[in-house]
Image (cartoon, grey):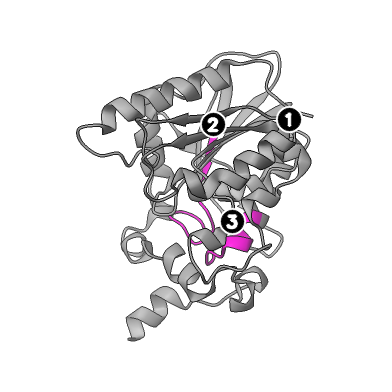
Amino acid sequence: MLLFAVLFAPSLGAREKDNALICGNGEKYLLTAAKPIWLFTRPAARPPPRGAVLAPELTMSDGVILRGLLVPASEPSERRKALLVLYGVVHYSDFVYELLQPLEVFDPHYDVYIYDYRGYWRSDGTPRFRALVDDVGELLASLAKRYDEIRIYGVSLGSLIASRAADNDKVTSIFLDSVVSRLSSLSKLCRDKLLDPVDMSEATCRKVTLLIGRYDSLFPPERAESFVERMRGCGNAHVSILADLGHPFSEGAPDGPRASALRATMIRRWLSNDAPQGP
């Protein structure tokens, strides 16, 4: 019991108090599910994987430090471009890098950032959905000082965060790989009208490219219907619903390699488009 308390009940900052929970205790335990593994691997002290470097540390307004990986651009570009990757609930920066790097989705004209959420892998703090959204908003504000253009690739949990954190003028395009309209469709403990993706800003709505897998059992297409209608309402038709895809990078054998290759092709095409949708 003492070990459990150490792992799951650390000292909380203002963004991390229980009254900040959107989805009750279920949110608290889901977002800390992998923490016991990370605790004993000392990830903050690990060197970056080959081909990546450690991203600059960023201190949030409540003092929590975010860390992650950076894949520097390998070719010059007239405009300074950054791609921010927001991953799924049980992922972390090194894993996502090793997942994406063989798929050749890292466009050579972009600095690619994979920051760990607070309480994840190399970063400090305790994860709360509201805090993760606030953190990404601050992260984007920091990147906006150094880049002419920022794009976001969000997967699963990352898509939910991106839909509510990407309201920044430097963000030109947002690729959401699976999403739900309302958090309450994932758990009855989640409170409606609190950071639901469908309630994204008008500016964000116009920048979204949405990919949905027809056989996604975690974020099934019917849970995104209101989100798709919201996109249509803001004049955005960038929606793909593909019958042979499941939840991102979770298709498993034998479909996994084919699905990942198809997804990678779509990401590369999206990044190479120099006229992204926007206001």
Res. 278 visible in picture = yes
Label 2 environment density (alpha carbons within 10 Å; few <14, some 14–19, many ≥20): many
Q: Earlier in the sequence, mark 1 or mark 2?
A: 2
Distance, label 1 to label 3, CA atoms, is: 21 Å
Of badges 3 and 2, nearer the viewer stands: 3
Q: Which of the two residues, 269 or 242, is positioned nearer the viewer here?
A: 242
| Proximity of marks 1 and 3: CB atoms separated by less than 8 Å | no
Among numbered discs 3 and 2, the one appearing first in the sequence? 2
The structure residue drawn at horizontal position 55% and vertical position 63%, both measured from the top left corner, is 184
Q: Of helix, strand and loop, which one carries label 2? A: strand
Q: Quadrant of the N terminus?
A: bottom left
- Magenta part of the chain: 113-133
The residue closer to the viewer here, 91 or 259, is: 259
The x, y position of residue 116, in whole percent, is 50, 50
- Residue under label 1, please give it: 235
Spatial CA distance of label 3 from label 2 is 29 Å
Observer-side mark, 1 or 2, equals: 1
Answer above or below: position of 5 versus 104. below
Percent position of residue 132, x then y: 59, 57
Residue for badge 2: 112
The kind of residue on which mark 3 rests is Arg
**Could you say whether the residue bearing mark 3 is in a helix, strand or loop?**
loop
According to the image, label 3 marks what residue?
182
Viewer-closest of 20 and 58: 20
Residue at the location (29% across, 25% down)? 258
- The foreground one among 27 and 149 is 27
3 inside magenta stretch: no
From the image, give the main secondary structure of the stretch colored magenta: loop
